[in-house]
Image (cartoon, grey):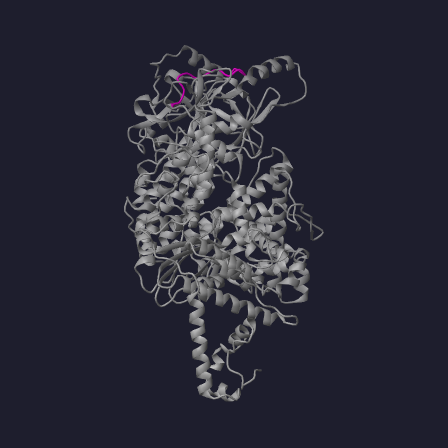
Amino acid sequence: TFNRKKPFLDTKDTKDTKESFIQFLCTPIFFSPLRAQTLNISSHQLSYFLITLHVKSLIKMSYLPRASPKASELANIPKEATLFLAPPVDSSSQKMNGISSSNIDPGLIPRLLILRNVVPLLCEKEHVNRLTLRGMGGLGKSTLAAMCVNLNDVRCKFDHILWLNLGNYFTERSSRNNLNYDTYLDCLRQLCRQLHVSADRFCCEVFIQPGDDKLLIASKTIRAMEESKLEMSQIIDGLNILIVLDDVWNHEDVEFFNFRTETSFFRMLLTTRTLDQEPILGSELINVELLNRAEASCLFSIEAGLDSIDAQDVEPIDSIINKCGYLPLTIRMAGRLVKKSRTIQADMCLSKIAEIILKESDSPAGMVSVNEIIDRSFLFVTEEKAAFALRLFLCSFTVVFSRDDILRPWVPFESVELLWMGQLKSESMKVFRQLGGKYKLTNAAQITNLMCIMGIFDEIYVDVPMQNRKKQQSFRIHHDLIWDYGKQICSHFNTVNGKMTHCRNQKVNCFEESAVHKKSVLQWNTVQLNKMLVKQFMLRSENSEERRRHWDPLLPPPNTRTLESMECITLPLLDWLPIHMIKAGLMHEAVDILHSDHFVTTQIKTFGIESTSRLVVSCIRSFEKKSYIEYVAKNGTSVYRSPMVSVIYFVQKYLQTLNTLFKLDNKSRGEIGCAIILLGVELQKFSKWAESLDFFLTSLNIFHSISYSDDHPDTIRATKYIDSCAIQHVILVRRDSKNKLRLKNPTSLLKDGGGESGVSLELSSNPGYGIVRMSDSYTQVNIKNNSWEYVTLGVGLKDSALVVNYDGHLIRNAFDGRMFYVGLGSFYEGMSVTLRSSFKKENDTTESKLTEKILQDANDGWAFTIDPEGIIYPTSAPHLCLGISPFPILYLVVHDSPSRAVFKHFIELNKTKKPQKITAEEHSNIYQSSTQQTVDNGIQLELESHPGMGIVSLCENIPMYPMGNSRTCAVGLGPVSNALTAKLNEDDHLLILGKYSGSILWPVTSSSLESGVFLAMTFFTEGNHIRFKVNDDGTISPIGAEHLVLGFQVPGSLHKRACQGLNR
């Protein structure tokens, strides 16, 4: 109230009374005659008051300091901006081309595509008032903003360029994530200092009286901030101003820095990792993406001090920047680490340094710093326990929704919701359940929305193939480094009886331990989280209390479990169910689902052929990664038989049936062909090379049937994998041979023996290939009361390469403990190298001393040396080393296989059978007395199926083994000029004549004959596995196994006819 008879704004009134009175009346409600009538004053008196008030305001504003226009043609660059462009302390004084300033970091990468978009939006577009650069931490958003304000085009346009780092106010956890009055005034004082004007106006406090409630205090605070904003607008009125707000957290704060007036040209440039869900009119957004390959390579080269990049350095550089996720921050760290390593060891090549960097940790160099940057994103949630709950949700999402074929897959909202519901019920989230309502974080939609705002998740709406329904909302983790962060968080906490353990450094329920313990904790948490999710899946499918009891605690008994019982589970949930079962250790249940026609049919109908095939492949890889290791740990060196092989055959047969019986369009048939290729690649990992060849040939037939040309990418891919089936034996060659093998990653084996997980035997001498097993099963041999198991080694695709450990002498398979061995310790050029078990000795006999001597002589075959160049050689024979056979090996294949061998002179060969017996002793005598020219009426083993080729020996001479005076040599496909000659005897033995006279063709196996068994020349004549018959079509089969014939893993001309659809 006031005295109406007293003059308005009497000079006797105190200053505070006048200002309070002005503030009270200076509201829109008083700008009306109605308000004048309410106050019992005339409209004339009110108008007089308002005019007086406006004049007083103008007088008051006239005393405010004003910023001056720029003194030169270019605006000054803020000191804060130059800090982002300055070189690091340890950087050299290099200059980047095109920048004359000596204080510019040479490692800066001008991201021209982004800068070309930023400059026009800031300087030319009239409708743009606010431009936002958004992206995850470490992408260089602030550096881009600093580059922008350094450009002459920008500096010419503006009188002043101002810079504020709002993120500095949230370095430490506080009770809020937005500005308060004090921090706002501090920001304004910083702006005044950059404008070179007095900041004394911005030191006032809000007038708070006793009894003011929270709403009134907030009202006064906002009013005070608005008044300060108005005063700042007057200071820069009439000038062209660009203000950069770096590291914005809360987009509601941005409007307090909008000092635009009608007489000024005002622009705002923001950098942020959070999403503005309600952008104002005139806002533009630029998403800052990762570096491209050229930019990443350039940045790495500068930081690593590489003047030029040689051809051999391209691959290690690519491997490092891939591991760094194309993130500028991590690439800089890795580059500086390489530079430091080269300083310490100048002679170390880049490939070896890269090998060390990638092996020492699962994460890029400097991951601790990256984790701190990612961790700051959670400061957006100010309550400590609520922020930790979100971290817990991220780490659960990371380990639950990861696939072996896709690190960061898109996950449907239904699955994310199920994960959140399961976690919310856990004891560890009890505190968060109490806080959720306060922060409006009670359901999965709110959680995922918040994670997207924070830049942790990406969101997408996609059409579901073959389904006419609304688009499906899906989420994924934004970046690989965030995935790494989530995995590390998951290794830092544990649960005991449903309650989380204590952590020293976080003040929340987590802990830190050694790397080994972290790994075990991560595995434990992965199992428990997936079990929890499977249980939620099953509970979603229940319809009765009785079924609930069946599914408790996880799954029903096998006799009551069917896919139809889960039909009420939404299809997106069913898509993830087998993967969760595998990760939860429910192997049999997962196999049952993958073997189900209903599951495969539902997946194809819902998600399409390509998506279904990739899901099956991901399940196979996850199953093998978990089940193989567990089986070996339980059964020692027992041979592992995976049920995934039958799953591969089942799905392949299903797809072939689908292609044959249904009228599909070419796109669907092409997808079937590609899916069968994926399955064939997985089959190769089980060393089933001959069977995988059939898969690839089927795919090629499908591609030709839909008129794919020979240069079509899918046709080329199928042909490439067909060629990959031509496995070449690993044998001993001379050190100067062009066929010698060289490992790609020898340093890891030499440094720590390959560590706990071992090292893949990928080859640098044969890019894309590695050392593999030639067969999926071991052959057992029994000689002189001793037995052992072995499998020969070959060179196949790197995906199937063996993983080994090395102790300086023995090369040991990391999975089953079997070791590399030169065939019975016989060091001859052309000898096969095997993966073999130790000798198993029977009871002592009269020949024990002789046996011990033989074993001692054979033991030299275990020891190998790996040199720094990656060459493997027998320690007892350094003049030899591991190499590959120049010719494909002779195998047993199915009778109708395109890779079967059809003999040109099969009729003549069949006529050579004579009614006379030749004993093994006579064979030996013939061998000892024969010469290189001896033919003895034999028939040359020339092939019609492979023109110009024949069956040849892979050894110059058949070597003598130390054990049992036995001789064996592999045979294969080679030039017809070197073809062997042979004949059949009365016992149906295929006798080799000429130089190798006395030897017999023999399938190398002690078990039943099957496709994939290879053949050799030998002097063993015992058993029924060495009897053959010549078929009417020119093929040769083992007697008793007529469904098999001699062949190769390289198709002949029959393959070409089969692919053209003329013959199978």
Residue at x 49% of width, y 27% of height:
747
Q: Which image quarter holds the N terminus?
A: bottom right
Q: Is residue 126 visible?
A: yes
Q: Which image quarter holds the C terminus?
A: top left
In screen coordinates, is 328 left or right of 507? left
Q: Nearer the viewer, residue 259 or 815?
A: 259
Percent of width and height locating residue 662 = 38, 58
Percent of width and height locating residue 517 = 64, 40
What stretch of residues is rendered in magenta?
A: 953-965
User: Quadrant of the rendered structure where residue 934 is?
Assistant: top left
From what the image shows, is residue 636 above or below residue 142? above
Percent of width and height locating residue 720 = 36, 39
From what the image shows, is residue 859 above or below residue 482? above
Q: Residue furthest right?
A: 497
From what the image shows, is residue 52 above or below residue 459? below
Our reading of the magenta stretch's main secondary structure is loop
Q: How many marks?
A: 0
- Tell me, yes or no, whether the highlighted magenta stretch contains residue 568: no
Q: Nearer the viewer, residue 904 or 887?
A: 887
Q: Is residue 412 visible?
A: no
Q: Nearer the viewer, residue 787 or 230?
A: 230
In screen coordinates, is 528 left or right of 749? right
Q: Nearer the viewer, residue 257 or 985?
A: 257
Percent of width and height locating residue 264 = 35, 64
Q: Residue furthest front?
A: 12
